[in-house]
Amino acid sequence: MRITYPRSFLSLLLIGFTIVAAPLLVALFTNAVAFERLAGLSEQAVHSAVKVTQASRSLIGVITSLERSARQYAVAGEATFLQTYRTHRDNFKAIAQQLDERALSEGQRVELTAIEKQEEAIHDLIARSRPTPELSSRLQKEFALLSDRAQALVRIGDQVIEDGIEQLRNQAVKSRNNVFWLVIALIPTAILLIAAFTFLIARPINQVSDSIRGLGEGDFAKAIRIHGPGDIVRLGEQLDWLRERLVTLEAQKTRFLQHMSHELKTPLTALREGSDLLSSGVVGNLNAEQREIARILQENSIELRKLIEGLLNYSAVHAKASYLDARIVPLRDVVRRVVNDRKLAIVAKGLRLELNCENVSAYCDEEKIRVMLDNLLSNAVKYSPERGLVGIKLYHEQGDAVFEVHDEGPGIPEPERDKVFEAFYRGTDVPVAAIKGSGLGLSIVKEYVELHRGRVEILDGPGAHFRIRLPRKREVEEAAA
């Protein structure tokens, strides 16, 4: 599945922050709405319950006033008390009307209806009866029942308040649980979103980093393609342009070396033939000083020829170093082949050879492995003293095939260990009897090791001690692909 990126890296960051923050904002908004609704319900419920309770208690006071004025009228029979009763009755009806307009529970509404009927019956009794002590006594009983109902209405209101508080408490607990589970759900969601956008952001950056590292390591064969935001893609195109320029410059350098080497061969051949003629006495006998000069010319022409051949070989090696002819190779056989090739030089110096090779196979380019080992063994033979010890070790360790080559020569000084793998570099601590090389052997070793996705290192020792680690399969398959 191809991922579609925005046009710029900044846009990708803004989109990422927006999407990651969106669930958090939704959660905050949802919680705010829930708590606002809960607060509104709480305020409404408390306000209504308080108003009903206040009206119910006021109703008790009005009933007491009704009873007092009604009984006074029943005993004295004066119109003033009757008028007072009617005034209190108007207040009673007004309060009852207020209660009736409120949102009452079913129990409250039943009780309020009963109170209104009871009061209506008392009013009818007063209207059709004459003021007598018996009427006063009967009114006392009727108002006692009315007061009891009013008290019951107050108790029902208190219970309604308690039930409302309990419902609000349950609603608060429910809201809190909803918030808790919402937060629990948001945590993995936010983590997944952060991980996804971290991958989207890191992927093009890693591609750019790998491309730059490949250019630094001289891997110019693979085209650079960056998948990401538009500005990162353009950066990848610029890196690919740089790769093509480096390929062109590398080709120009190789052609320059080849041309210069061939051009130098012609005057070198003349110089070599002239020095041979002088040394052989064809043009006349030479005295001792002349023979010494001819010998110096002859030796330096030989060394110059070797340097030119080294340049040609390096150009050919460098041209072939971009690919691997890889297959399963028994490395112990390669070691034996290299030793046989150098057997005459080893015998000529009386060197002792110590082989400790396990039966190790690897997926590699056999010819390049042979060249690597031959260069290392050649250096070991060259720099070893007479009757010295040269050792080759082969074993496997943690999925790698490991070669070690060591000798008893002067070794490599610590300051020069980072330089000996550079092309054309020759160490300063060279034995007088040793023939100077071109300085390309270790450069080729390092180039071939890196092509196999391995590494070469110099170990401490009495002499030179090299160790090469090569992946036995997977990384080399990727390099050869």
Image (cartoon, rainbow, N blue to C red):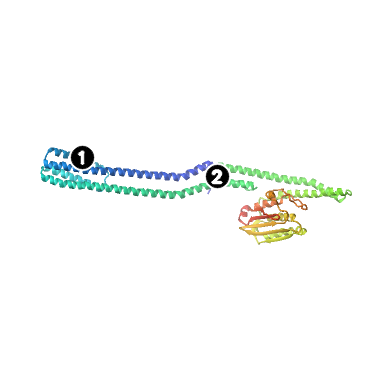
Mark 2 neighbour density, 10 Å: few (under 14) some (14–19) many (20 or more): many
Which label belongs to residue 390? Answer: none
Residue 351 location, quadrant: bottom right
Q: Position of residue 61 (x, y in %)?
A: 21, 42
Q: Is residue 474 visible?
A: yes
Give the number of the mark in front: 1 or 2: 1
Which of 156 and 110 lies nearest the eye of the viewer?
156
Give me the C-alpha separation between circle 1 and circle 2: 81 Å
Q: Secondary structure at mark 2?
A: loop
- Which of the 4 image quarters holds residue 367? bottom right
Q: Is residue 100 visible?
A: no
Image position of 71 (left or right of 464): left
The percent coordinates of residue 70 (x first, y second) are: 15, 42
Which quadrant of the view contains residue 460? bottom right
Q: Position of residue 331 (x, y in %)?
A: 67, 59
Q: Residues within 10 Å of mark 1 (few under 14, many from 20)?
A: some
The three-letter code of the residue at mark 2 reads Gly
Q: Mark on residue 91?
A: 1
Looking at the rendered structure, the number of numbered marks drawn on it comes to 2
Q: Which residue is mark 2?
A: 228
Which residue is rendered at x = 59% and y = 42% of the image? Answer: 235
Residue for point 65% across, 51% down: 450
For badge 1, the amino acid type reads Asn
Residue at 75%, 49% (x, y): give it. 307
- Give the mark nearest the N terminus, 1 or 2: 1
Q: List x then y, in percent, for residue 121.
A: 16, 45
Mark 1 residue element: helix
- Between 131 and 29, the one nearer to me in the picture: 131
Q: Is residue 82 left or right of residue 262?
A: left
| Left or right of 157 in this view: 175 | right
